[in-house]
Image (cartoon, rainbow, N blue to C red):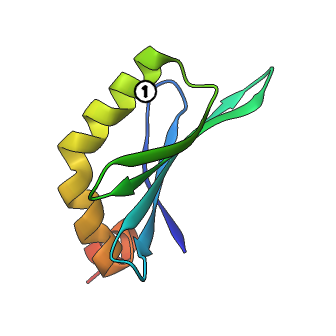
Amino acid sequence: MMYRYLTLNDGTEVVHSDILPDGRVKVLFERPDAVDGFHDATCFLPDYMWENISGFTDEDMRRNERLLKEVAHIIIELAQEGGFERASSF
C-alpha cells in the first residue's frame, strides 16, 4: 500500500510504502507534466537508492534528495504505523 506524505509547491507528490519485506521503504516522487504525462523517481530508504528517474532535472533531484534526507526518519516511522492518517488517528 502507498500513503501520501506531502505535496510540494510545484505539484510533486511524495508517497511512501509500508515497510517492505526486506526492511526498506519505497518513496515515490511524481509530478504531472503537460508534455510527458508524469515525471517520477523512486527512492528506497534507509539506503537512499534511487531508480527509475524520469523527467526530473538534476536540480529537481538535488532538491528531492535534500528533502528526503530531512524527513526520512519521519517517513520510516509512518511506514511502520501505516501512513500519516493512521499514525495520527486516536
Residue 25 in view here: yes
Q: Which residue is mark 1?
A: 61
User: Which residue does the image show at 25% across and 84% down from the upper left?
Assistant: 90
Residue 30 in view here: no
Number of numbered discs visible in the structure rendering: 1
Left or right side of 33 for 45: left
- Residue 32 in the image: state x and y as whole percent: 68, 32
- Mark 1 residue element: helix
User: Which residue does the image show at 26% across and 59% down from the upper left?
Assistant: 46
Q: Quadrant of residue 11?
A: top right
Q: Is residue 1 above or below residue 10?
A: below
Left or right side of 33 for 68: left
User: Which residue does the image show at 52% across and 45% down from the upper left?
Assistant: 51
User: Which residue does the image show at 56% across and 25% down from the upper left?
Assistant: 56
- Residue 79 in the image: state x and y as whole percent: 34, 71
| Residue type of the residue flagged with mark 1 | Met
- Residue 27 in the image: state x and y as whole percent: 44, 54
- Residue 85 in the image: state x and y as whole percent: 38, 70
Residue 68 or 6: which is nearer the viewer? 68
Residue 57 or 79: which is nearer the viewer? 57
**Disc 1: CA contacts within 10 A as few (<14), some (14-19) or many (>=20):** some
Quadrant where the image shows the N terminus = bottom right
